[in-house]
Amino acid sequence: MENLGDAYGTPRFEGRDPRRVFAGVALGLLGATAVVVGVLLVTTPLSDWVGATDIRTAEKLAGTLGGLGIPAMFLAVVAVLPSSRREQIGVGVGTLCCLVGIGIFQYAYPGRWTTGAETLAFETAMAYFVGASLSFWFVFTAMASFRTRNNPQGMVRLELTHKGESKTVQVSPREYRRYAEAVRSDGGETEEVIRELEERAKE
């Protein structure tokens, strides 16, 4: 159990794997680059440099890069920030929906986009919209909870380490005092405190 000074400390990675943080940063930069390149492909002569001389080919490549870049940046946020498993799964599901939209776009553009007997522009847009909205919502909740964790508001942050895995739990000062007294009294309540904190860390 940490003392109050340790509990209010702000370790650099807050119990997260540094490799995950660096991978998230790299993924975010890659996603942002993909979006910028996608825009440049249809607004500058860059398309000629990459061999996409036909306007439809350039638009298809640009749409694909931009479509991949946005969910990549969403994934990067939950990788870099402390996030719950629910938030990570939510962004993952949203990303899969975006990939479905990109797959439909690859199949439909340009021949089955807005002309012809079978048009798939609406289906593509809806699949991507649902995925992007879902990812954005869980990214928003991760960012909101991160701000809450970093805003004292009388809360104490405890870092639990078990079998090499670290997790952070927020408790109120009253809860912290109760846990600390239970551990100090050594009245057989230490294991119960540990189990309770581990359950809260899983939320």
Image (spheres, rainbow, N blue to C red):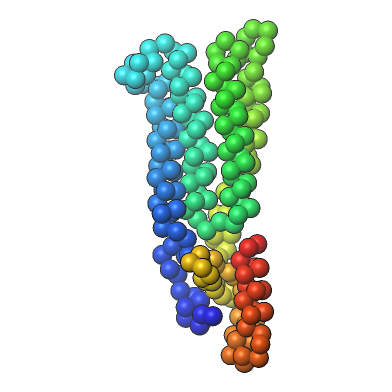
Res 149 → quadrant:
bottom right
Residue 7 against residue 117 in the figure, above or below? below
Residue 105 visible at all? yes
Res 143 → quadrant:
bottom right
Left or right for 99, reference 80: right
Q: Residue 148: x percent and y percent?
A: 57, 63
Residue 140 visible at all? no
Q: Residue 90: x percent and y percent?
A: 63, 46
Name the image quarter holding the C terminus.
Answer: bottom right
Between residue 136 and residue 159, name the one nearer to us.
159
Residue at point 43% right, 27% down?
Answer: 38
Residue at point 65% right, 74% down?
Answer: 195
Count of numbered tags: 0
Residue at point 45% right, 70% down?
Answer: 10
Residue at point 66% right, 91% down?
Answer: 187
Left or right for 38, reference 124: left
Q: Residue 33: x percent and y percent?
A: 39, 35
Q: Residue 181: x percent and y percent?
A: 62, 88
